């Protein structure tokens, strides 16, 4: 059985320079990808065999199967 699910999550940047950072699955938890989004850009992604957690830095709307949330700006 896979530890992943196939749900997508959506991140919409509400300011320039929002960072979406993917963290590795497994015992070694580290950053493996940083995607920079400018205001209005949308990233649609999944958790995968390689990615078990995501960190979002900057003002963005985040939709997941757990609901929708808005985080605050960095400044
Ligand atoms: N190569 C990554 C992976 O398959 C791509 C990726 C998927 C990703 N979901 C992500 C990168 C979320 C950052 C955030 O796992």
Image (spheres, rainbow, N blue to C red):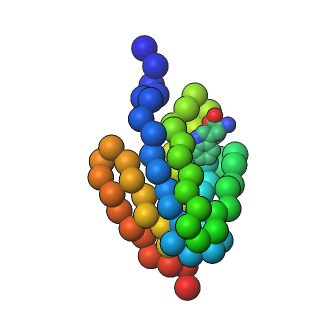
Residue placed at 42% from the left, 35% from the top? 7
11 vs 51: above or below: below
Q: Relative to 36, is 48 on the left or the right?
A: left
**Residue 72 locus on image (x, y percent):** 44, 76
Residue at the farthest top position:
1
Residue placed at 30% from the left, 48% from the top? 66
Residue placed at 56% from the left, 52% from the top? 43
Q: Relative to 71, is 37 on the left or the right?
A: right
Q: Nearer the viewer, residue 17 or 28?
A: 17
On the image, which quarter does residue 45 sit in? Answer: top right
Q: Nearer the viewer, residue 69 or 38?
A: 38
Looking at the rendering, the quadrant in which ligand 1 lies is top right
Q: Is residue 48 visible?
A: yes
Q: Quadrant of the C terminus?
A: bottom right
**Residue 49 locus on image (x, y percent):** 57, 28
47 vs 74: above or below: above
Q: Relative to 48, is 7 on the left or the right?
A: left
């Amino acid at each position: 059985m896979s530890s992943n699910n196939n749900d997508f999550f959506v991140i919409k940047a509400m300011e320039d320079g929002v960072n979406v950072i993917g963290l590795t699955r497994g015992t070694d938890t580290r950053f493996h990808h940083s995607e920079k989004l400018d205001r209005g850009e949308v990233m649609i992604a999944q958790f995968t065999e390689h990615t078990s957690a995501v960190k979002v830095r900057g003002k963005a709307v985040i939709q997941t199967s757990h609901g929708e949330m808005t985080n605050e700006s960095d400044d």
